[in-house]
Amino acid sequence: MRAAPSLPYRRLLNQRIAGAKLGKPEQVVKHFGALQAQDYNQALWAIGLRMRSATVMDIEQSIEDRKIMLTWPMRGTIHFVPPEDARWMLKLSAPRVLAKDKRRLEQLELTPENIESCKQIIHDALQGNKRISRPNIMQLLEEAGICTKNQRGYHLLWHLAQSGLICLGPREGKQQTFVLLDEWVPRPKDVSVSEALALLAERYFGGHGPATAKDFGWWAGITLSDARQGIEAAQSRLISESVNGEIYWSSPSECVALEERPSVCLLPGFDEYLLGYTDRNAVLRAEYAPFIVPGNNGVFMPIVVIDGQVAGIWKRTVKNKGIDIEISLFVPQKEREESLMDAALQYCTFMGLPLASTSIQLMK
């Protein structure tokens, strides 16, 4: 009798890393509810690797076409979200995030008057479906006598995004642009707090399950009480199971496999497979965690995942001749080196560049 697929493998399937892929960027983002995007280029790959066929240009075109968008809805952290969901997500999370921001505003000497002045300046500059790069917005504020140095400018933009005034638009070269949320995204019908919690629970467990209420609460940046309320409201559209005395939730449409298949993949930094849960022990051994977040500085490295387990890190170097990929493993994986090469080629195909070289070594 075959053993039931493990929790990590079921997550690989439900996260569309293994098994059935999706066809469009907007399908990937909606499947997750929101997708981590702290590093823009890494986030493009997070979407692309979950599609049947994709290039970096495909993902960026979907941003230009307003099929997906970037804002700060979960934990005040940047994510890709479906445009039609951006407002209710911000409405759900922003009050809690902004309430915690008062101390930081004091440290930066940003007063309500400063924020209101910035709001008016930026609104007037962007009105009429304009998009302006971050450096140019900073220049506008400086010219108006508002200092943007020492993180003040970035924090102002973040604050105005949390307040629902602006969001990120398509890039201009390597620069972020900002647009008015009300002009960029059509205004959908209002969603109540209880409806929002239920929707978010359904999306989260559909894209991340099996997972716990605590995982959901951490990911969404809501209280455990609110997380449980969302689960209760969406319970008819979810299924539960007990694992080691803890309740895990997932979608009834969960991808099911009769048996586990070998899998090797190169995931981006900040990927939902690792960052989408408060408890990561199922896929990452404690002794390896310092390699994934060096110095515990909050920056998650791109990871190598072999059969559902984090097995190392990787980095890319883009050159004129193509991409050099360096893979560093925690333990030798001789029998998987061909699969690692295939994974490196998959990434280069997504980027539209040849694989110039690949090195596989043990972590130093």
Image (tube, rainbow, N blue to C red):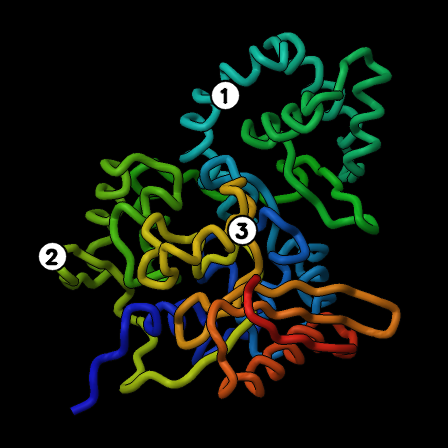
Mark nearest the camera among 2 and 3 is 3
Instruction: Quarter of the image for the N terminus: give it.
Output: bottom left
The amino acid type, in three-letter code, at marker 1 is Asp
Tell me whether circle 2 and circle 1 mark residues in contact (CB < 8 Å).
no
Earlier in the chain: of badge 2 and badge 3, it is 2
Question: Is residue 96 visible to the viewer in this orientation of the structure?
Answer: yes
Q: Is residue 51 above or below residue 179?
A: below
Q: Which of label 2 and label 1 is nearer to you?
A: 2
Residue placed at 48% from the left, 23% from the top?
98
In terms of secondary structure, where does tag 3 sit? loop
Image depth: mark 1 or mark 3 in front: 3
Disc 2 and disc 3: Cα gap in Å? 30 Å
Residue nearest the viewer, comparing 305 with 163: 305
Q: Quadrant of residue 263?
A: bottom left
User: Mark on residue 177?
Assistant: none
Q: Position of residue 237 (x, y in %)?
A: 25, 60
Q: Secondary structure at mark 2?
A: loop
Query: Which residue is labeled 3 in the image?
Result: 300
Residue type at numbered disc 3: Phe
What label sits on residue 101 in the rendered view?
A: 1
> Left of 37 or right of it: where is 171?
right
Q: Residue at the location (38% across, 85% down)?
A: 261
Q: Which residue is mark 2?
A: 245
Answer with mark 2 or mark 1, whichever residue precedes in sequence: 1
Q: Residues within 10 Å of mark 2 (few under 14, many from 20)?
A: few
Residue 113 vs 245, above or below: the answer is above
Which sits in the foreground, 160 or 102? 102
